[in-house]
Image: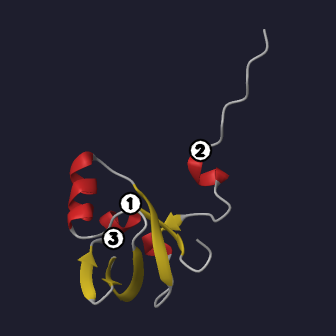
Amino acid sequence: MHMAPTSLPLQQQSPHPSYPLTMADDNTLVRICTLLGGRQLVRRLTELGLNQGAELRVVQRQGGGLIVARGETRIALGGGMAAKILVTDAATA
């Protein structure tokens, strides 16, 4: 019996690789492609305007966390929360 190959995870199929927000360079415009984590975390991020497709810019790093800008709004994120936001460069998205 021949088994059909399984599909690759969504991240690997994308022509533009995603990476955690914590790895984004300062002042680089990035686009959110995936929110990892539980329902509560995803809901909280969405309430902050950090939903799939949103464009962000890393403004400042503070310890393990960062401050990001979405338009004129500045949002402070802890390192753990920022690591669960997968982004891609907005110029290539």
Q: Earlier in the sequence, mark 2 or mark 1?
A: 2
Q: Earlier in the sequence, mark 3 or mark 1?
A: 3
Residue identifier under label 1: 84
Determine whether 25 is above or below 1 in the image. below
Label 2 vs label 1: CA separation?
17 Å
Q: In the image, is 2 to the left or to the right of 46?
A: right
Q: Nearer the viewer, mark 2 or mark 3?
A: 2
Amino acid, disc 1:
Lys
Residue 79: mark: 3
Q: Position of residue 39 (x, y in %)?
A: 25, 47
Q: In the image, is 19 to the left or to the right of 62?
A: right
Amino acid, disc 2:
Pro
Q: Position of residue 13 (x, y in %)?
A: 66, 51
Label 3 vs label 1: CA separation?
9 Å
Residue 33: mark: none
Residue at 26%, 62% (x, y): give it. 46
